[in-house]
Image: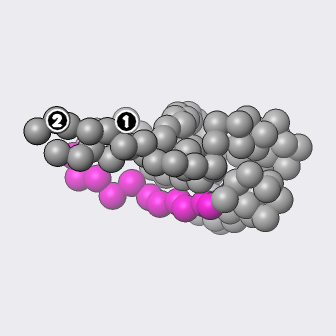
Amino acid sequence: GKTEMEEAKGVVKHILLAKFKDGTSPGQIDQLIKGYANLVTLIEPMKGFQWGNDLSIENLHQGFTHVFESTFESTEGIAEYIAHPAHVEFANVFLPQSEKVLVIDYKPTTVRL
């Protein structure tokens, strides 16, 4: 049979991988995570937020230790989020404490075999 790709309707994921600078304390990282999570309450198009630590045993993480996943309903919503003063303010705190970040936006797509 034909393989079908089914794009999720009204869901766009915004993924940020971070490696914090050496010397960033667990307490500082905790505050950054809480600040990130708080953006959900401040920025209407941001519908959800989850995060986690890298648990991989494959050693392919390229130094990234934390993953942050935000959920939006559209790419327009992400654009609104990025321009929002609360996001700009948070980014100005988060980014200086990060050695590197990687950001990807995507629409979750299911493969029907």
Q: Secondary structure at mark 2?
A: loop
Magenta stretch encompasses residue 109: no
Residue 98 percent location from the top left of the image: 62, 40
Q: Secondary structure at mark 1?
A: loop
Q: Which residue is mark 1?
A: 62
Answer left or right for 35 relative to 99: right
The mark that comes first in sequence, 2 or 1, is: 2
Magenta stretch encompasses residue 57: yes
Say which amino acid is labelled 1.
Answer: Gln
Residue 99 percent location from the top left of the image: 58, 36
Marks 2,1: beta carbons within 8 A:
no
Quadrant that contains the N terminus:
top left
Residue lying at the far right in this picture: please name it: 85
Q: Residue at x 49, y 38 (%)?
A: 106
Disc 2 versus disc 1: nearer the observer: 2
Q: Which residue is mark 2?
A: 2
Boundaries of the magenta span: 48-58
Q: Residue at x 84, y 42 (%)?
A: 84
Answer left or right for 25 relative to 76: left
Quadrant that contains the C terminus:
top left
Q: Quadrant of residue 85?
A: top right
Q: CA distance from mark 2 to mark 1?
A: 36 Å
Q: Residue at x 63, y 50 (%)?
A: 72
Answer left or right for 46 relative to 1: right
Say which amino acid is labelled 2.
Answer: Lys
For residue 31, say whether it is visible. Answer: no
